[in-house]
Image (tube, rainbow, N blue to C red):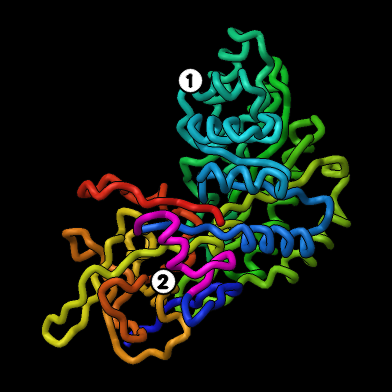
Amino acid sequence: MKPVGPIPAGYEAIDGELAIGGKRASEWVAEAGRTPLFVYSRAHLDARVAELRAALPRRVGLNYAVKANPHLAVIGHMAPLVDGFDIASAGELGLCVAVGIDPKRISFAGPGKRDDELEAAIAAGVTLNCESEGEGLRALAIGQRLGIAPKIAVRVNPSFEMKGSGMKMGGGAKQFGVDADRVPVLARRLIAEGAEWRGLHIFTGSQTLSADAIIEAQGNVLTLAAELTDAIGHGLPKLNMGGGLGIPYFPGDTPVDLPKVGAALAERVANLPQALADTELCIELGRYLVGEAGVYLTRIIDRKVSHGVTYLVTDGGLHHQLAASGNFGTVVRRNYPSAIASHYEAEPTEEVNIVGCLCTPLDRFADNAAMPHAEVGDVVAVFCAGAYGATASPSAFLGHGPATEMLV
């Protein structure tokens, strides 16, 4: 028997059934008219931002990384809660503009920005997090053609990484950012040739549960930013320190000690070097803000036994929740947090495999998991579905189409 991951705090039951946003899962399914269905909880989003605001020093702003969940209603809900938005494409820029976000609050990162994307961002007044010398020169040329001074920050590839990071975004050879030793020359050239200097973006990694690793990385980022600012010879308007805070997905995972991270950062911010005395500071979070706010609901359409093993076959699958299937960078497949939503408070009575509807053995949500007895028509809940779910999964695979998404 394999355990499932820890279900996030804040989910309760009504009449024995999983409740989200004050309604039973079956009520949301009825309102949507179908499964599969992503349900995103406003209450969870609000609570997570409030926790961060309480833990972080006031001087440190909070940016939302739109790639984690670009659902329009989620972006719109986050707009008054956070200070800025980080995007990774012109498509995400369009989504932000569609819900009325001021482009001045937006920064644009990504190692492969096309000329048309650069032009759209420059024309709108978005800050470009420049990933290479070539990109910087292209931005300058586009800005000259448009008659607009492009707002440019330089994304730095530092020599260090974030320890224990699920995805390392810094240290050694990387497609992300400009190697730290080349940043001063590029920054001085951008400034000399008319760019509006917007600072540095230093992102070292993501999905880290160790407070000590996050604290060490943040300290290294601040030290490097001060050194680069001195070398550039111009003040640093803004420093995006990146993110890295992870959420528990698997058995044995424990939440980040947020108060410890906040206290250490507050101490560093209170003793900043002179080079950063007037710098606007922010951290950039995606998964940590929205991941635990989402639940994927999928209905059981078949119950079958093969060689003594019980399979609960659902109408969902990896085409909507690739990460939960173990096919999104996981080396060893482990069970995501999941439950039988229809019998949320019931005790486990059997060992089952919960699988999707696709014609591939990779399509599975839970292996050998202890669950209460479930039948055709019952609903399965897969938690931690608020980040890198609907848009990070191959929704066109086998033609089943996308899932419905709801902010409740």
What residue is rendered at 75% in x and 38% in y? 238
What is the CA distance from the residue labelled 2 to the residue labelled 1? 40 Å
For image coordinates 80% across by 30% down, the residue present is 234
- Horizontally, is 295 left or right of 47 in the view? left
Q: Residues within 10 Å of mark 1 (few under 14, many from 20)?
A: few
Q: Is residue 77 above or below residue 190?
A: below
Q: Earlier in the sequence, mark 2 or mark 1?
A: 1
Tell me if label 2 and label 1 are in contact, CB under 8 Å: no
Task: Please name the amino acid that badge 1 sits on.
Answer: Asp
Disc on res. 115: 1
Residue 336 numbered mark, or none: 2
Q: Secondary structure at mark 2?
A: loop
* Position of residue 47 in the picture relative to residue 339 (left or right): right
The quarter of the image holding the N terminus is bottom left
Residue type marked 2: Tyr
Disc number lying in front (2 or 1): 2
Where on the picture, by quarter, is residue 33?
Answer: bottom left
Q: Which residues are the magenta region?
A: 18-35
